Amino acid sequence: MTTELQIREAVSADAEHIWSIIQEVISSGDTYAFAPDTPKADMLNYWFASGAYPFVALVNGKVAGTYVIRSNQPGLGSHIANGAFMTASQFRKNGVGRAMGLHALKAARQRGYLAMQFNFVVKSNTRAVALWESLGFRIMAEIPDAYRHASDGFTNIYIMHRGLEDQ
């Protein structure tokens, strides 16, 4: 069976699929700062906020993942992108996250960003850390006990960064 992966800008019609992925990912309380009980409206407002660029990854036409990029800071820090990435569990370990990461680096550069920074990568999320490192991100800082992990308790987080000059 041939697998077709497509990434495109998200539209309002994608909102239910995006919410389904977000809800699944944050419900475990082990990878994102968003509380597991964050309301749907709050999450979709975050994903589709003014100044945000949401995308969806489609596998054989089905929404398999989503990401959003935006300025990491306003004003004089707006040249650095920030991103959030989520993949539906049934599509993990199939290259969807990597494809979204590569796409995001290009999309950020096309929008004029000079670098991308993740402010809150949970240290115990080793799959995400390994993915970002393989895409050229470096750990710039480690913040102790910054995350209340659902099962591990207080856990460290990383700030990760990479330039986009090669995009």
Image (cartoon, helix red, strand yellow):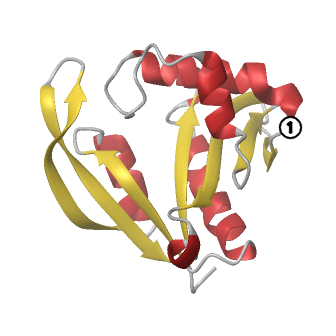
Q: Quadrant of residue 134?
A: bottom left
Counting other residues with Cα less than 10 Å from the Cα at mark 1, is it few (<14), some (14-19), or many (20 or more)? few
**Viewer-proximal residue among 92 and 161:** 161
**In the image, what residue occupies the spot 80% across and 45% down?**
6
Left or right: where 150 falls relative to 73: left
On the image, the x and y values in percent for residue 152 come to: 14, 24
Identify the secondary structure beneath mark 1. loop
**Viewer-proximal residue among 166 and 154:** 154
**In the image, what residue occupies the spot 43% across and 29% down?**
34
Q: Amino acid at mark 1?
A: Val
On the image, the x and y values in percent for residue 161 come to: 39, 69
Judge whether 152 appears above or below 117 on screen. above
Quadrant of the rendering where the C terminus is positioned: bottom right
Residue that badge 1 annotates: 11
**In the image, what residue occupies the spot 60% across and 28% down?**
43
**In the image, what residue occupies the spot 30% across and 59% down?**
159
Q: Residue extending furthest front?
A: 75
Judge whether 54 appears above or below 31 on screen. below
Query: Does residue 163 appear in the picture of this structure?
Result: yes
Judge whether 27 appears above or below 10 on screen. above
On the image, the x and y values in percent for residue 40 come to: 62, 18
On the image, the x and y values in percent for residue 100 come to: 63, 50
Q: Residue extending furthest bottom?
A: 165
Left or right: where 29 falls relative to 99: left
